Amino acid sequence: MVNMDKGSSTAGFDGLISRVRQCQYDIRNIDMYINSRIAKTAMNLWSETNPTRVLSRIIESRAFALSPAGAIACERLTKGTQPRIIIDIGAGFGTSTLSFALACSYYKQDDVRVIAVEPNALKRNALAEYLQYCELGQIVEIRENVCLDALELNPHEPVLFFLDCWPAAMDSYFSQLAKIDLHECGWVAWEGMAEPQQSTINVNVKRNFDLLFSFTDIDLFAPLFVMTDLVSKQG
């Protein structure tokens, strides 16, 4: 079901939205140990016979996909904040990345850069296949890792940081965010189940970003809906 705010004609976008939703459904199937129908990289992820496979390897390869409501919230977040750069850290197989790229296309934010950061090579390859299937590859740059304070961000261009990664990595990224000054031009959202140490959410991070909040997919991204409403009113 398509559930995007329609501010303009949807002609030409119905097929794109349908493909993105197919991919996001496919990713949730991978999370339930069902083979992918779209990404050849992930096709035999669970059917391979590998006696040396260990629990940590299985956990690392899971999708941990956002819910449909969470994916739609990413699209509304993109519309509400209108960033010039979206940095999706812990992109995984790409549920959130696909939503960010879809929103950029749907709301005609053609000059937005989406950087998807994912250390797992299998997931990066599958994400590339999903983006190719949806013809959104030109919007997204896929990286194995990123050094945030080396991105040379323009302090006057809105940036959205979306963090959905393991706790150890979360702490490292928050330390980097403390060095970036994007007051009134930067937003940070991070997955609350992987809450960083409170010491890393220091005064610099709180001062340097206009909006800073945690979310969990359990509550269907309620903070995102509240936040985008506030941004819309401020705009």
Image: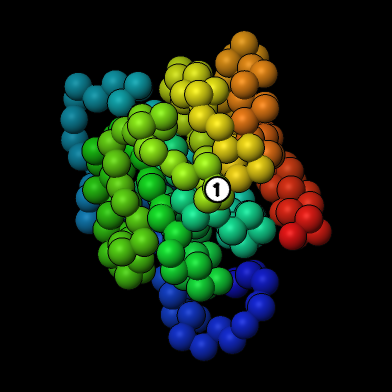
Q: Is residue 24 left or right of residue 232?
A: left
Q: Residue at x 53, y 50 (%)?
A: 157
Residue 187 percent location from the top left of the image: 61, 41
Going by the numbered disc 1, the residue's amino acid type is: His
Q: Residue at x 58, y 20 (%)?
A: 196
Identify which residue, 20 or 141, lies in the foreground.
Answer: 141
Q: Is residue 234 left or right of residue 88?
A: right
Q: Residue at x 47, y 31 (%)?
A: 165
Q: How is the image coloured?
A: rainbow
Residue 195 percent location from the top left of the image: 60, 23
Q: Quadrant of the C terminus?
A: bottom right
Q: Quadrant of the N terminus?
A: bottom right
Q: How many marks?
A: 1
With respect to residue 170, does 191 lie above or below?
below
Q: Secondary structure at mark 1?
A: loop
Identify which residue, 194 or 116, lies in the foreground.
Answer: 116
Residue 155 visible to the viewer = yes
Residue located beneath label 1 in the image:
156
With respect to residue 166, does 78 lie above or below?
below
With respect to residue 195, does 3 lie above or below?
below
Residue 229 visible to the viewer = no
Residue 105 percent location from the top left of the image: 47, 70
Q: Quadrant of residue 134?
A: bottom left
Residue 162 percent location from the top left of the image: 53, 41
Identify which residue, 144 or 178, lies in the foreground.
Answer: 178
The 10 Å Cα crowd at callout 1, few under 14, some 14 to 19, many 20 or more, is few
Q: Residue at x 66, y 77 (%)?
A: 6
